[in-house]
Amino acid sequence: MTVITIRVDEETKKMMKEIKVNWSDFIRNAIRMKVEEEKRKNLAKAVLINEKIRKKSRGEARAEEIIRKFREERHVGSSS
């Protein structure tokens, strides 16, 4: 396990001592929750970006259709 260090002021340290909490576990869990929250935000942003791109491309031929068209034209052109 990796060790990280944080600094708190004296008043905060006194308040922490008054409460029976495993601060290491608390901080580890808080970090995990924040990381998961940020991952969800990033995923949501990616979905929104994907939707914007998808909406902009409506009306245009799909890549598969374009490729199929080029292959058919190439095939017709080579058999002449």
Image (cartoon, helix red, strand yellow):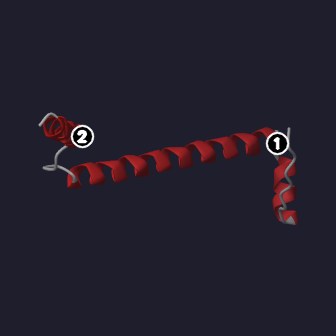
Instruction: Give the label on residue 35, or none.
Output: none
Q: What crowding class fits label 2: few (fewer than 14 Cα within 10 Å), some (14-19), or many (20 or more)?
A: few
Q: Which residue is drawn at the image coordinates 29% and 53% (left, top)?
A: 53
Residue 57 in the image, given as x and y percentages of width and height? 21, 52
Q: Which residue is drawn at the image coordinates 82% and 51% (left, top)?
A: 16
In the figure, is residue 67 to the left or right of 1? Answer: left
Residue 10 visible from this viewpoint: yes
| Outermost residue to the front | 80
Residue 19 in the image, given as x and y percentages of width and height? 81, 45
Q: Secondary structure at mark 1?
A: helix
Of mark 2 and mark 1, the one earlier in the sequence is 1
Under mark 2, the amino acid is Ile
Q: Quadrant of residue 71?
A: top left
- What residue sits right under mark 1 in the picture? 24
Q: Quadrant of residue 11?
A: bottom right
Residue 28 in the image, given as x and y percentages of width and height? 75, 42
Q: What crowding class fits label 1: few (fewer than 14 Cα within 10 Å), some (14-19), or many (20 or more)?
A: few
Q: Which callout, 2 or 1, points to the residue nearer the camera?
A: 2
In the foreground, 40 or 6:
40
- What residue sits right under mark 2 in the picture? 67
Q: Which residue is drawn at the image coordinates 25% and 42% (left, top)?
A: 63
Tell whether label 1 touches label 2 (CB within 8 Å).
Answer: no
| Quarter of the image with the N terminus in it | top right
Under mark 1, the amino acid is Ser
In the foreground, 35 or 80:
80
| Quarter of the image with the C terminus in it | top left
Q: Quadrant of residue 62?
A: top left
